Image (cartoon, coloured by chain):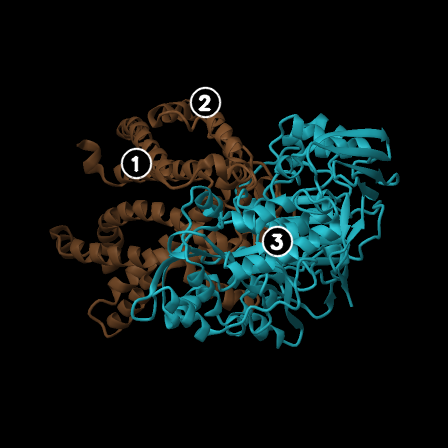
Amino acid sequence: MTFELDRRRMLQALGLGAASVPLIGDVPSAFAAGDTVTIGWPSDVPSWDPNQRFQPDAQPIFKLVFDQPADQDPKLTLIPKLLTKWELAPDALSMAVDVRDDVSFHNGDKMTADDVRYTFFERIKAGHKVDTANSWRKVSDIEVQSPTRAVMKFNAPNPTAPVWLAFLGSFVVPKKYMESTGVDGFVQKPVGTGPYKLVEYQLNSRIVLERNDAYWGPKPKIRRVIFEIIKDPSARVAAIQSGQVDLTINVPVREVDRLGHEPTLAGELNPITRVVLLQCRNDLGFADDNVRLAAHHAIDKQALSKAFYGGAAVPLSVPATPGTPGFVPDFKFTYDPKLAVQLLAKSGFDTSKPAQIKFATTNGQFPSDFDIARAIQQMWKKVGIDAEIETIEYAKYFELNRGAKLPEATLYSWDNATGDPEMFSGYLLNPKLPFSAWKGPEVGDKVVELFSVPDYNKRVAAYRDVAKFAVDKGATIPLLQSVQSLVRKKALTYVKYGNGWVLADTMSWT
Amino acid sequence: MNAILLLIVRRALISVVILFFVAALLFCVLRLLPVDPAAMSLPPMATLAEIEAKRREMGLDLPLPEQFLIWLGQVVHGDLGTSIHFRRSVVSLVASTLPATVELAVIAMAIATALGLGGGLLLFHARGTAAEPAIDFGSIVLLSIPEFLWALFFILLFGVALGVLPFTGRLSPEFQLPTVTGFLLPDALLTGRLDVFWDALKHMILPAFALGIAFSPTIMRVLRSSLLDVYHEDYITQARLRGVSERGVLLRHGLKNAVLPTLSLMGVQFGILFGGTLLVEVIYSYPGLGNLMVDAVRNADLPIIQAVGLTYCIVVLIINTVVDALYLVLNPKLRIA
């Protein structure tokens, strides 16, 4: 087709165009309003290869286009998805899995055990740069016995393998298609088995998904889902208030209350499986047990919740959230500033001669992080701990920790969509992992042992004991169960998940 | 014409040297940051041995000058590395986001120029009148409000309160991005999609005004000062004595001479305005280079920071060359010199 640009014709057309299109769009659309939902989302996907990067915020988007071998229900119980069954061997060295036989990828290819093997073994061995290479590093082979049956073999006990089937990055990708397109081709035109297909993607701006009418599972009610990537919280507030989006998350807590009073909007603060805690070192100014325990007793968690989360964040005594297996309901670590003063006095500190520590925090990584740090600093000052606050980038946490450069205490937010205690106490207190600032063996050795315990009940019970022990030792200072702030149009309903997943395939208009 | 060509050639040669030094500076500064690109490019659970292997693979164990030369060699061949966060070619990321930013910056500059020249003339016209202090005060207020505040204010006013303009992205979801040049407005026209053109323009109005309005007061004030200076020159008096009207004096003699320093300023302003797109793009979810850079800084994605830094430098060099060429066109004395 040729197109000749004639100045007069163009100006005439421009004038006509401008006159005929009103300022805000009644542009013809193939979708009726009830068929579409627009979501204001705070971050983009890092890549359309779902195995590539572990980014918790991207999971609810990936879950629409791709499927995982297993899934979680709203109460976080593990349920079948692409696998109908999995059976972890008693020694946790292998896991037999049964694959559904009625699933097709968006391009029509049938999904089989070969795709499972490709996703969790072959592409890792082929050297693809995927984060799943780390989570599934213990996989020594996947023996495909039939298109619907395979056995995953591990080179070391892997008790949390079933949990990882539904966790970060574990999405089945199509072997045949990816081998033909290569990874670069795949990320340009991704193909999954999920309830939606990707129809448009603009980096850092918009994702448009269309319902996969051939989906093997329950059909979503919404035909088209649009994610507007709006990184600025104020802009997300404006977008939901102006009606440019139908639902948004991670808006400032005070705005949830205000917007919730709008006649067409509903504001929610939902407690999720995210803990806000202080990661502690076992040396420097925190070498003394009394100082660490005093630091914990001096913090009024209820006051923090009220001041920064409208009282919706639940104060925690262990690094696990209520309702998850590792939570210990009958264990309470008291707020007792007098006891804090006594503990500090035993070590020769008081308000005139305070214990000196450094205290790291992020600023803007999670709601009110810097303000929470400042409030804690004031609480500590009253009992005789002088903390100097330093701001760090969240992305640098691991590196600083690896280099033993974190200060005595670090305010930290930890997401665990699975709710499994290994991903709470295990990761947060295992000195061999970069998440734990605590390197002391008295807690660390107990935790490391639990990574190989195959029996689920024994493992969970042991994690509860370790969590209590670690808190009593001052190895960690759990603060609050964090909340997810969400504002939506009242007419839009969705299913709440305990881990904060907001899934468009559960949404509908009333 | 020859003078302009000579200028462009000379500038191109100097630009190569400047680019080399900027690249070296960027490279060294980023390597001095307490960030390990090897560790950042692996998942948190990676072992120290894996990080060490990655470091070797990325050549980070080599001496800094050697690392720089390897990187420079790759840059010369059009390879700016792979993004740590996106794990994609940096060149493709920059190429896909640059047109949006250039388009936004050019329109914002046009707005800043229109407002700046108009305001400057108004300020000059009101000199010595009762309105002068009020207009002067207005320009100072405009000058003191940064672009991101304008961005938020416009969203609240035109997006939320009045609800007349969209404020997320480049285009409504109803439309597919036409991809001919990557520049949305020309692409819409080239593909004959006036509806897309209009929609894109609506999406561009608020961010472009937020950027443009923040940069207009400087142009206003410099133009006013230049006009005041020019009006003290003998040729203005002589023009009046020749019976030229005040309007003629202003347009044919005053403005023509006063606009030269303003033009130089606009060249500098464009560089700053281009940098100002960072926050504005984030606020308006505008998928440009600024948005990419903010992500890169947050994720310590050094290859992107490096590439975007170089891109900014190239844009500024091009703009300065264009401004100097315009200067030559408008000022015959320089051509003779």
Residue A494 horizontal side relative to residue A46, left or right = right
Contact between labelled residues 1 and 2, with CB atoms less than 8 Å apart? no
State the mark number for residue A315.
Answer: none
Residue A402 in sight here: yes
Query: Picture coordinates of residue B126 (x, y %)?
Result: 25, 67
- Helix or strand or loop: what does disc 1 sit on? helix
Chain B, hue in figure:
brown
User: A209 or A88, which is in the foreground?
Assistant: A88
Contact between labelled residues 3 and 2, with CB atoms less than 8 Å apart? no
- Helix or strand or loop: what does disc 2 sit on? loop
Q: Mark 2 vs mark 3: give the one in front.
A: 3
Query: Picture coordinates of residue B230 (x, y %)?
Result: 17, 53
Residue B213 in sight here: no
State the mark number for residue A424.
Answer: 3
Q: Quadrant of the N terminus of chain A?
A: top right
Residue position for label 1: B325
